[in-house]
Amino acid sequence: MSTTATPPRPAITGYPFSVAPMMDRTDRHFRYFMRQITRHALLYTEMVTTQAIHYGDRDHLLGFSPAESPVALQLGGDDPKALAACARIAADYGYDEINLNVGCPSDRVQSGHFGACLMAQPNLVAEGVAAMMAATPLPVSVKHRIGIDEQDSYAHMAKFVSTVAETGCRRFTVHARKAWLQGLSPKENRTVPPLRYDDIYRLKQDFPHLWIEINGGIKTLAAVQAQLQQVDAVMVGRAAYDTPYDFAGVDRTLFGDETPPLSRHQVAEAMMPYLADWTARGLKANKITRHLLMLFHGQPGSRSWKQQLTEGSARAGTGAEVLAQALAAVTAAQKQAAIVALTHSPPRPHPQDRSGPGWTVQEDSQLSSNCLKGR
């Protein structure tokens, strides 16, 4: 099949910034927390398999708060009929989008014949995407890799995208690394294969009618802005989890919302009634507070915050008070840091002492000028 782009279709729009689906991380509690930091970014569920939805507790797997929207459900599976059924269920639950996982390289995922191994079968992926699109009006997208194993040339990726795009799918999220299906762990597959951003830039150039989102190794808002010069959107993964407040400027910078973001303290306060509600239902506090540990990353009091949350959440019957206690510890630590900074600031030098640590060239020039004027 030719890799030449199909004729242009009506322009498609999407979210310029999203937080990646991450197993054991992007559950409903993290999404609610992240929504306090950004009102507009597209958030994702963890990957949910079609088998789990068919046989498991759907409310547990798929339930979410409307306050989390917009939210995309990421599905894992290879059976078009099962994917279509799950897409209909997702629409009933109120999800905003459906995404198909064609990027996870783990052995467990491969054993179920989905994830990154499906890049070797673009026609099967296309069948699954077409089935989902026929089953629901929700937007359907695909998240995939640059390539897999030895099938990692640009031509391989372009053929994959071209084949899937023939279904009418217009949104592709590309992790800028290939995946080794054997020999590397999922963690190693996120770091060992080199990043190949240029291949994704080329993909956007060759398929201008598609919405191309880049993923992999992007850790700051400045890096996001730089990538948006080349592609339509950026997906950030672990950086959004490990340094969540670093992306508090996303709404203003990328979505044009001039509403000031909540401060870190305000984010913590906003989580208190949420934590109180869930712990009253019997949920252990650490199921929620574990996602908040990095809120004060890089700030005075960060260690106290994490210690209070970790130790407090481990106690039976803990509720929202653990957040209040942790926030009080942060406030105390920050006040102490401010006092230390003030008392340890270098003293201002005497006007005649030009060797002091606080002396500046500007002050030296000003003093000379004043002396010449007889002041």
Image: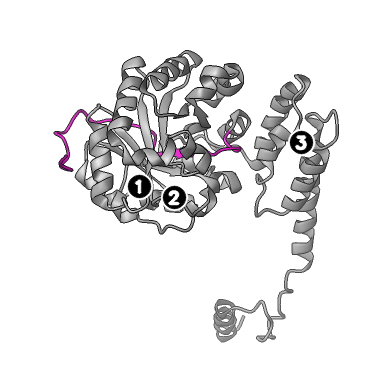
Which secondary structure type mostly characterizes the magenta part of the structure?
loop
> What's the distance in space between the residues labelled 2 and 1, CA to CA?
14 Å
Residue at mark 2:
216
- Magenta highlight on residue 134: no
Q: Looking at numbered disc 3 in the image, what kind of residue is underneath it?
A: Leu
Q: Which residues are magenta?
A: 1-26
Q: Looking at numbered disc 1 in the image, what kind of residue is underneath it?
A: Leu
Residue under the image location 47 percent in, 15 percent down: 89
Q: Between tags 2 and 3, which lies in front?
A: 2
> What's the distance in space between the residues labelled 2 and 3, CA to CA?
32 Å
Q: Secondary structure at mark 2?
A: loop
The disc label shown at residue 178, or none: none
Q: How many marks?
A: 3
* Residue 328 position by quadrant: top right
Q: Looking at numbered disc 2 in the image, what kind of residue is underneath it?
A: Gly
Residue at mark 3:
323
- Magenta highlight on residue 7: yes
Q: Secondary structure at mark 3?
A: helix
Mark 2 Cα shell of 10 Å, populated few (<14), some (14-19), many (≥20): many
The disc label shown at residue 228, or none: 1
Work out whether residue 205 or residue 199 is closer to the camera in this orientation and state it: 199
What sort of colour scheme is used for the picture? one colour
Work out whether residue 105 or residue 275 is closer to the camera in this orientation and state it: 105
Earlier in the chain: of badge 1 and badge 3, it is 1
